[in-house]
Image (cartoon, grey):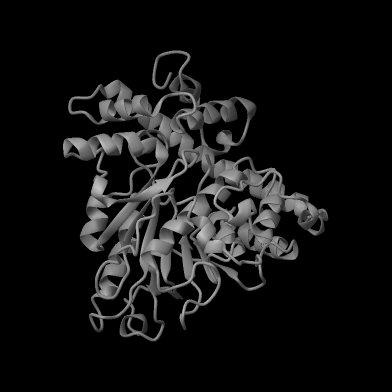
Amino acid sequence: MLLGDSGSIWSALAPYASAPDHELAPSPRLDAALHALVAVLQGASVPPAVLAAASCSLAAPGQDGVLAARAADVRDVAQRAEGELERAYAGIILSRLGSGAAAEVTAQDDAGVPREGWPDGFPPPAVVALAAASRPFPYVDHYVRLVAAEAAALSAVIPERSLSGKEAGTAPGLRLAFCGSGPLPLTGCLLAAAGAAASVTLIDIDPSAVAVSSRLLDLWTAAGALRGGSVSVLCADATRVAFAVDPESVAARSPPPDTIARVAADVVFVAALLPTAAKTAIAARMAAAASIGPPAAATPVMAVRTAHGLTADLTYEASGRATLSRLLPFVGVVVPRTHEAPVAAAAASGGGVRGEDPDEVLGWFPSEVLNSMELYGGGRGRGARPADRCADCAGQAAVLTAGRTGGMSHE
């Protein structure tokens, strides 16, 4: 089913392995193969125990080199196809909203928007508007689930700042920087629309992606999905950006000479498709900044959207936790429910599963969510520690959004 010679996901995707990127634009044949891959990884067509066994088989010493090569082919096609999918649908959404649909999306009901985790089962109005204004992108609902769960996980690590768009004590709302936002920046915009971030800075190195996302921001704001000025976009290499909680801190005022921008942020969110080397470079710069100034100085949390187990084998590369945790204190990881049984088994046997220490699992994403999220750094001079574990990160999103009035494809 996965990597066999015929009738498998690999055999369906293999013809695209040597194709240039533009030939991986959405098409019925390619879309069907990718949807089949997503169904497998979600546990919809294969039991989670089988997924865990397949992943361990690929990771075993002396593994079959042919299977490893086929897994790499599937991962390469999936990543490049995702980029082309987002590029294509960003253009479709721009055409749709530019034709006058922007004024109509706020009138649509929320029947198609996932309700899990929202207060009383109702997503905030701005989230509904943004979801409606982002269709027909096929993974809109997936993003809504993912972002709600990620916001809940972040709340356990940054308890002193409100993730509901309201002040917690005298602290301002959360400031978030998203590195590798791409042409269709749904994650950062959904966090802003839900009130989970008071301000969001989108960062991408590709000028064409920045130009498209800038136009989308204008149209989403016109549709009532975003509060004007809550989201901005910066064309820059994120590995050369200086991030700081306090813009007036010693570290913020004395960045490395190759710094091209300074961004105030409580959370530095890193996209799954950003290369491992870029993730490492961002962490290294943050670690260097944390070493400057008084030990008690607050430092941003680095949230890395990543993958584990078979999802890392076949779609997104693992984050490189061994390297990142040498640069910034590792706080913990949130993984999909499809990993729950393997992690429990590891706890019983005293071992980990593909790098997941049961004691470091902060909580669970819904099974529909493919990605994991690793958290690093933060706190004051030391790694942030969660105020409480988020046993069910989708369910706890309701706590974050109480009283709010609104305001496979992942970045």
Residue 189, position as x, y percentages in the image? 59, 60
Seen from this angle, which residue lies furthest front?
120
Q: Residue at x 32, y 83 (%)?
A: 254
183 versus 164 height, above or below: above
Seen from this angle, which residue lies furthest top?
6
Residue 316, position as x, y percentages in the image? 40, 41
Determine if residue 372 is in view.
Answer: no
Quadrant housing residue 2: top left
Determine if residue 366 is in view.
Answer: yes
Q: Residue at x 30, y 67 (%)?
A: 384
Horizontal relation, residue 291 to residue 202: left or right? left
Q: Residue at x 47, y 35 (%)?
A: 78
Nearer the observer, 242 or 55: 55
Residue 214, position as x, y percentages in the image? 63, 63
Residue 183, position as x, y percentages in the image? 58, 54
Q: Residue at x 66, y 67 (%)?
A: 405
Quadrant where the image shows the N terminus? top left
Nearer the observer, 328 or 75: 328
Nearer the observer, 362 or 181: 362
Nearer the observer, 117 or 146: 117
Total of numbered circles in the picture? Answer: 0
Horizontal relation, residue 324 to residue 26: left or right? left
73 versus 404 height, above or below: above
